[in-house]
Amino acid sequence: VVVLSSNDGCAVARSNEVKALGVKMGTPWFRMRDLARRHRIVGLSSNFTLYGDMSDRVVAILRDFSPDVEVYSIDESFVGIDDSGGAWGSPAVMGQAMRQRILQWTGLPVCVGIASSKTLAKLANHIAKTQPQFDGVCDFSVMASRELDRLVDPLDVREVWGIGRKSAEHLHRIGIDTVGALRRVPAVSMRSHFGVVMERIASELRGLSCLELDDVEVPRQQIITSRSFGVPVTMRGELGEAVSTFVARACERLRRQESVCGAIHVFIETSRFGEQHYANGITVPLPEPSNDTRVLNAVALSGLQRVFRAGCHYKKAGVVLMDLSHDGFGQHSLFDSSVTSARSVQVMAAMDAVNALYGRDTLHLGSAGTQSRWVARSDNRTPRYTTDWNELPTVRASQKLATGRIAV
């Protein structure tokens, strides 16, 4: 199985069988079609709604084990167990209980890495995932130093959390190829070569925790919403529908973090492989900070009108909400009406509540349209089993048999 990027473009996730066939991350799907036919590779469209819901379910289970949970990404979290591990006898037993409950309640297999620092915990997770003898849970905190060295030291530095491709290349040039070599270098010298971030990584690899557990999501400084289109868009009205949709999505996130926006950037782009590539964008400041979808949408459409060029086949568009601040601390206009502001808050709260109860876009601006011909392709998307009544699995039973059993 491979999971494809937006518009079913390229492979962004691959099963072990596909990796063994030599398929690299980012391989375009059209180049894999012959290989897929020969080896029965199934290409699935991205299903972000399902992924997000399943991620939320896993995090809810983790919070049953510990109140200290930092959601690092859609498929990874850090869990503090200082006050919770004792109830289970050992952190490893607690880790196995996590795995079993998540598997039973969601069907998702997970691995657990336990250590005294975040960076070591990530490596422990890597060991748990790649070495079957640990049965999905690797606890560095109770491991003898010699055993820990044997497992960790041979790993390439690229396996270390926070070390990207360029940093790894730089480390290789100065003779630091493995995790063991990085652990042996004094942290202070790492700071002189790379800065404080690498110093912290080196310290964390020695078991010294330098990165606190963040159980509160930090408000974003920018909110970006963009998509590639399923078909080329040529008409400004249709492009405006897409921009209005992106503004609505961004404003939902803006209100969730209780922020307001001071400026909005709108950008459009044609295919990079077309004969006449055109890309342009414009930043438009708001008269005063707002998180009202109607206000930001009007500003975004005025910006779109200024950068739109007729005759182009647009492949992508997006909006960026900029100059974010906490709601209530913005500079208001001299002629601002408190009644108008209160109504704005009430209208947006009502819209969010209706859409949360009855489904996204139950209430939306008319400028977003109703057809959405531009929506990205997802020809092979699996059903959104957990969030859409219409996509629940259907089981049909035949008539009752003489044995008293039901044939399905």
Image (spheres, rainbow, N blue to C red):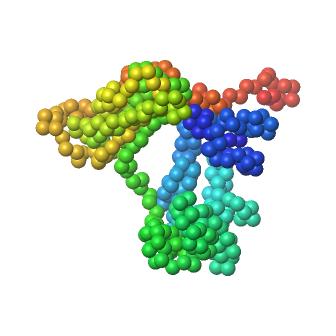
Q: Which residue is drawn at 79% across and 39% down?
A: 39
Q: Which residue lies furthest to the left in this view?
A: 334
Query: What residue do we see at 32% from left, 28% from top?
Result: 306
Most distant residue in the right direction: 402
Asked whether residue 363 is in view, the answer is: no
Q: In which quarter of the image is residue 54?
A: top right
Q: Which of 160 and 313 is in front in this view?
A: 313
Residue 20 is at least partly visible in this image: yes
Q: Is residue 22 left or right of residue 223?
A: right
Q: In which quadrant is the N terminus drawn?
A: top right
**Percent x, y for residue 236?**
40, 22
Most foreground residue, 208 or 37: 37
- As displayed, is residue 369 above or below residue 293? above
In this rendering, would 273 be left or right of 37? left
Residue 125 x %, y %: 62, 62
State how many labels appear: 0
Q: Who's the residue at 32% across and 31% down the image?
A: 303
Q: Name the side, left or right, on which 349 lies relative to 202.
A: left
Extreme-front residue of the structure: 275
Q: Which of 404 and 148 lies nearest the eye of the viewer?
A: 148
Q: In which quarter of the image is the C terminus?
A: top right
Looking at the image, which is closer to me, 10 or 160?
Answer: 10
Left or right, residue 111 beside residue 351 = right
Q: Point out residue 148 in the picture as x, y percentages from the top left corner.
A: 65, 74
Residue at x 56% of width, y 54% of height: 76
Q: Position of residue 330 (x, y in %)?
A: 22, 45
